[in-house]
Image (spheres, rainbow, N blue to C red):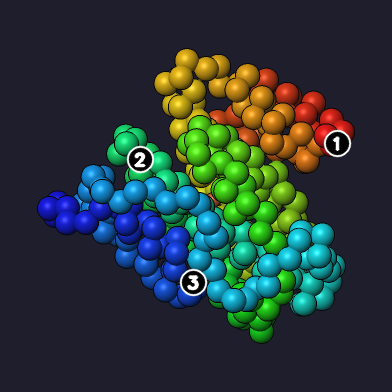
Amino acid sequence: MNTPIADIFSAAHQCVASQQVEEKLQLTKVTAQQWREGYFCLATDLPVQAIGEAGHPAKPLLVSPVKVPRRGLGSEEGRAALIHAVTHIEFNAINLAWDAVYRFRGLPKQYYDDWVRVADEEAYHFELLSKRLQSLGYQYGDFPAHNGLWSMAQKTADDPMVRMALVPRVLEARGLDVTPGMMARLKKAGDDETVAILEIILRDEIGHVEIGSRWFKYFCDERALNPEVTFRKLIDDYFVGELRGPFDYELRQQAGFSIEELEALDVLARQPAKE
Ligand SMILES: [Fe+2]
Ligand SMILES: [Fe+2]
């Protein structure tokens, strides 16, 4: 174990701020490795800055979700567009994990262990997918992408309980619902290489959502709140009319959702949008 010589919050901030893809990946890997080696401490004078834009490269062009073109998976371009969309989610996920480390202070060391690990795994996912894109003749930035994930980080920047509920347990958890179907469609299109990558990602993402569930319950317990009631209320406040099912009960249960919670989500997903 090394003597800690730097604080993890400064390092996490640097990872979020980096605008170069390669640099962000490299910083993420090195920081995660050094965290595991005991290089960082949890004490800092660094004030928490208000959340702004996370560092991202000039491309992909960020557009509203409806303007992201959808293509069939029959063509290589169509598959590349789908892989690009997932690659972009992973890029955002690196920023989201580091922001969860940077922004919320004074928590048990396990919280930082968990979110540093998530950042490291998201960088790995990004690399797997961007290499796959390259083998199809494309690269990250070639298609437009949307910015919905980061805007949820901005809406949940003031409260780690709300962040845990709405980022890992709603946005990341959506991946558990849709990835098995995506894998089936890619398999049908004969793209076994991408299917193998998505298998790794799906396995890790169950872990990320489980981390979100665990810390959400921790914050609820601290405040003597019922986690299931609180989760439903937060969905109602932030997502009503926008929550999309169907939900993968089996994978979500592995990630810390109860049957009652999933049944409540089914009801919420059927509600009309708020005016
Ligand atoms: Fe991921
Ligand atoms: Fe994730």
Earlier in the chain: of badge 1 and badge 3, it is: 3
Q: Which residue is mark 3?
A: 19
Give the number of the mark in front: 1 or 2. Answer: 1
Q: Is residue 222 above or below residue 73?
A: above
Mark 1 vs 2, N-terminal side: 2
Q: Disc 3 to disc 2, how far (Cα)?
A: 24 Å
Residue at image coords 42%, 46%: 103
Residue 188 image position (x, y, % from top left): 79, 63
Q: Report the quarter where the C terminus lies.
A: top right
Residue 171: quarter of image? top right
Q: Is residue 27 above or below residue 89?
A: below
Mark 3 and ligand 1: say if the CB distance to the nearest ligand atom is below 8 Å.
no
Among all residues in the image, which is located at the extreme left? 3
- Of the numbered discs 3 and 2, the one sitting upstream in the chain is 3
Specify whether 94 is left or right of 69: left
- The amino acid type, in three-letter code, at marker 3 is Gln
